Image (spheres, helix red, strand yellow):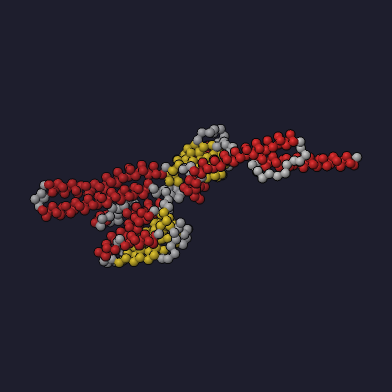
């Protein structure tokens, strides 16, 4: 009896061990693990053959699922539109490269937008089916953008338990083009009316009373040339502003050497500064952080600010240009960056005008602005360029105390 019991325990132990090995083998095959391992030793060859076929089938299926998951991830990652995959609990399961580039750390802020939340709720509602839900969003971060959102319910075994797929198509450029076209026509027709009327009047005078008056003809032709030049500057500034507004939502990506660019631009002003008997002081401090930006647009910022200081500064006075590293906090955003400041010692700007200086065609003194060749668009151009660079424009002035224009740009 003892021998029989011991034999039974031995057989049971051997079968239990083999069943455990069989379970491990099937588990590894099901998860795609091809590392091998010891198989059962006491099962009949026929059983082992069937086990091997099942193991190979499970392994092939696991490999197929793995390939499908990688293909799904590759497709989502390479889609040009920002895409966010949400679970049934509305938690973010996945974002693609376009979403991370467009929104960065602000994805949760976008998802809290009331219109988008309502579309997600409709898509997840019982009985909603698979019909996509749409919403029009205006997102203020990191810059104002207009987005068309499409929320699609998901019921795929590959979606990792996801509830909905939100595709956020940026329509800022298209809407900006539409607005720019309308604004350009309105602004151009308004601002060009005066110089055109002057040109028409002088042409009529040259054809009539001044037809035989060479001194009057010379004087009128000079005035006509000034008006034509003014119209040319105005059109150039309007076109420049329109191009900037169209791309304002897209952050630039050039590596800027701010010190070198600023020095090169200031060198081009030396002749004009000397003609007004003014002095240029330029102080770039060491340790300036690297900045990402658009080279041509940054040149426009420096040119417009220095040009303003030259036009409205005191004759025989000084223009002070400084570039300094900016520590987080204070009057600038809570991240590292640099500050470009341009200061003059002219008549200054009364405080009540400061808030409106960057509006199109806003002039503190319209007569003086036109007399020095201003179009009323320079600071509007600067503001939109700084917005595109995710920076801050700060204007400090008071009547009789000159003006300082500071541009903060974030470090890369």
Q: Quadrant of the N terminus?
A: top right
x 40%, y 59%: residue: 257
Using the image as rendered, state which of residue 117 and residue 4 is in the foreground: 4
Q: Position of residue 172 (x, y in %)?
A: 41, 44
Residue 242 in the figure: left or right of residue 200: right
Residue at the limit of the structure toward the right, as seen here: 1
What residue is shown at x 28% (from left), y 50% (from top)? 234
Q: How many marks?
A: 0
- Vertical placement of residue 128 versus 298, above or below: above
Residue 135, image x, y percentages: 47, 39
Q: Is residue 226 left or right of residue 52?
A: left
To which quarter of the image does residue 125 belong?
Answer: top right
Residue at position x 78%, y 39% from top? 42
Residue at the limit of the structure toward the left, as seen here: 212
Could you say which quadrant of the image residue 394 lies in?
bottom left
* Residue 129 shown left or right of residue 339 in the figure: right
Query: 176 and 187: which one is in front?
Result: 176
Q: Residue at x 30, y 43 (%)?
A: 185
Closer to the camera in the image, 225 or 291: 291
Instruction: Residue 403: tell me if it is visible.
Output: no
* Residue 55 coordinates in the image, percent (x, y): 67, 38
Where is residue 309, by image quadrant?
bottom left
Looking at the picture, tell me which residue is in the foreground, 20 or 342: 20
Toward the front, the furthest residue is 45
């Amino acid at each position: 009896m003892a021998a029989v019991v011991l034999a039974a325990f031995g057989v049971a132990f051997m079968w239990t061990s083999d069943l455990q090995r069989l379970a491990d083998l099937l588990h590894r095959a099901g998860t795609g693990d091809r590392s091998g391992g010891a198989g059962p030793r006491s099962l009949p060859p026929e059983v082992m053959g069937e086990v091997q076929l099942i193991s190979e089938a499970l392994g092939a299926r696991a490999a197929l699922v793995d390939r499908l998951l990688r293909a799904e991830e590759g497709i989502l990652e390479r889609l040009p539109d920002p895409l966010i995959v949400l679970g049934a609990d509305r938690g973010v399961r996945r974002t693609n490269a376009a979403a991370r580039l467009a929104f960065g750390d602000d994805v949760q802020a976008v998802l809290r937008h009331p219109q988008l939340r309502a579309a997600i709720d409709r898509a997840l509602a019982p009985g909603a089916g698979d019909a996509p839900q749409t919403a029009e969003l205006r997102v203020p971060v990191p810059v104002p953008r207009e987005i068309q959102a499409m929320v699609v319910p998901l019921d795929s075994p590959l979606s990792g338990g996801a509830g909905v797929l939100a595709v956020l198509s940026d329509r800022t450029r298209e809407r900006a083009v539409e607005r720019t076209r309308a604004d350009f026509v309105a602004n151009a027709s308004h601002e060009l009316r005066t110089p055109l009327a002057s040109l028409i009047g002088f042409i009529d005078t040259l054809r009539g009373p001044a037809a035989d008056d060479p001194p009057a003809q010379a004087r009128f032709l000079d005035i006509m040339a000034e008006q034509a030049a003014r119209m040319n500057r105005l059109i150039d500034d309007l076109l420049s502003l329109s191009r900037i507004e169209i791309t304002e939502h897209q952050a630039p990506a050039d590596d800027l050497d701010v010190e070198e660019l600023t020095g090169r631009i200031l060198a081009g002003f030396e002749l004009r500064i000397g003609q007004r008997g003014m002095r240029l002081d330029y102080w770039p401090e060491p340790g300036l952080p690297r900045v990402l930006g658009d080279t041509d647009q940054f040149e426009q910022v420096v040119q417009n600010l220095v040009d303003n200081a030259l036009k409205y500064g005191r004759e025989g006075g000084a223009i002070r240009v400084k570039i300094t590293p900016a520590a987080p906090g204070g009057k600038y955003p809570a991240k590292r960056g640099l500050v470009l400041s341009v200061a003059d010692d002219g008549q200054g700007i009364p405080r009540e005008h400061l808030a409106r200086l960057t509006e199109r065609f806003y002039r503190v003194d319209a007569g003086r602005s036109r007399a020095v060749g201003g179009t009323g668009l320079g600071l509007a151009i600067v503001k939109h360029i700084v917005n595109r660079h995710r920076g801050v424009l700060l204007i400090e002035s008071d009547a009789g105390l000159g003006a300082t224009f500071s541009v903060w740009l974030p470090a890369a």
